[in-house]
Image (tube, rainbow, N blue to C red):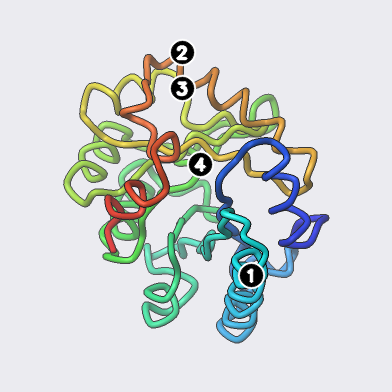
C-alpha cells in the first residue's frame, strides 16, 4: 500500500547508502490497504525476483528481500498459511484489530503468533500511535520472555508509532532479545524516519549488537528462525 514501486523504493534506498530493503505489505484482512492474498503475494515474490535479477545483471550489489506484515487474527492465528510464509525471507506479524481484549487475552493472542516457526519479527508490539492511539493492554514482560524463548525479534518502528518505546527497548537489551529498526516507509521520502528509530534505540541503550539490521545482511538472515 505504498506510493512508490518496489524498484523505486530500492533505488531510493541505494541513494541513502542502504544495502537492502525488506518489502512487507499488509495481508488480505486489511482490505483498506489492499492487503495481499496468497495469489498476489506470490506475484509480488516473482516481481522481486525479477528486480533482483536485474540488479545482478548490472552488477548492483543491492538486494530486495521478500516479506510480509502478516495480520494476527483474534485467536492468534495468522492471515496467510504456513506454506506461503515459509517461502519468504522474513515474516513480520502484527495486530491491527481487536484492540480491546483483556491484558491476558491480548498477551496470549500475540504469544501464539510469536510461537509460529515462520514468524521472525513482531511489528509495533504495543500498537500505539503517538498522540493518536494508546497502546493496548499487554504484558510486555511476558512478550519479551516469549521473544527470548522463540527467537522472535521485536520491532522498533521509526514512524509516528515509535513502538517499541525506550523503556521496552531497555528491557529487551537486558533480556538479550534482539530488535530491528524499521522505517515503515510507505513513500520513498519516508526513509528519513530511520533516524527517529535509531534515536529511540539509543534512548533504550541499544547498541549494534542488539539491532539485527545493523549487521551484515547474511549474518542477519542466519539468525532468523528459518
Residue 215, how many percent across, how many down?
A: 39, 37
Position of residue 77 relative to residue 14, above or below, is below
Instruction: Select label 4 or label 2 by which is in front.
Output: 2
Closer to the chain start, of discs 1 and 4, is 1
Residue 66, label in figure: none
Do the CB atoms of the residues marked 1 and 3 lie less than 8 Å apart?
no
Q: Is residue 74 left or right of residue 111?
A: right
Instruction: Name the residue tied to disc 1.
Output: 57
Closer to the chain start, of discs 1 and 3, is 1
Position of residue 188 relative to residue 171, above or below, is below
State the residue at coordinates (56%, 45%). 19
Instruction: Name the residue tied to disc 3.
Output: 201
State the residue at coordinates (61%, 72%). 53
Dividing the image into 4 quarters, which one contains the N terminus? Answer: bottom right
Do the CB atoms of the residues marked 2 and 1 lie less than 8 Å apart?
no
Residue neighbourhood size for the residue with mark 3, other residues' Cα within 10 Å, grouped as few (<14), some (14–19), many (≥20): many
Instruction: Select label 1 or label 3 by which is in front.
Output: 1
Instruction: Name the residue tied to disc 2.
Output: 203
Frontmost residue, 109 versus 115: 115
Residue 124, label in figure: 4
Amino acid at each position: 500500500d505504498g506510493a512508490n514501486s518496489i524498484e523505486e523504493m530500492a533505488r531510493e534506498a541505494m541513494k541513502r547508502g542502504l544495502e537492502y530493503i525488506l518489502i512487507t505489505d499488509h495481508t488480505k484482512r486489511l482490505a483498506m490497504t489492499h492487503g495481499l492474498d496468497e495469489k498476489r503475494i506470490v506475484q509480488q515474490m516473482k516481481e522481486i525476483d525479477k528486480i533482483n535479477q536485474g540488479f545482478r545483471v548490472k552488477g548492483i550489489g543491492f538486494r530486495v528481500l521478500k516479506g510480509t506484515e502478516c495480520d494476527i487474527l483474534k485467536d492468534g492465528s495468522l492471515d496467510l498459511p504456513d506454506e506461503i510464509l515459509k517461502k519468504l525471507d522474513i515474516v513480520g506479524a502484527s495486530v491491527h484489530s481487536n484492540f480491546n481484549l483483556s491484558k491476558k487475552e491480548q498477551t496470549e493472542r500475540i504469544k501464539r503468533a510469536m510461537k509460529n516457526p515462520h514468524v521472525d519479527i513482531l511489528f509495533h508490539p504495543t500498537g500505539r500511535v503517538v498522540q493518536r492511539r494508546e497502546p493496548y493492554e499487554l504484558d510486555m514482560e511476558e512478550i519479551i520472555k516469549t521473544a527470548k524463548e522463540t527467537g522472535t525479534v521485536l520491532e522498533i518502528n521509526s514512524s509516528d508509532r515509535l513502538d517499541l518505546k525506550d523503556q521496552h527497548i531497555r528491557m529487551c537489551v537486558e533480556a538479550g532479545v534482539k530488535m530491528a529498526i524499521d522505517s515503515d516507509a510507505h513513500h520513498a521520502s519516508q526513509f528519513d524516519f530511520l533516524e527517529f528509530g535509531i534515536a529511540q534505540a539509543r534512548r533504550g541503550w541499544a547498541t549494534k549488537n542488539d539491532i539485527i539490521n545493523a549487521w551484515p545482511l547474511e549474518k542477519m538472515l542466519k539468525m532468523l528462525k528459518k
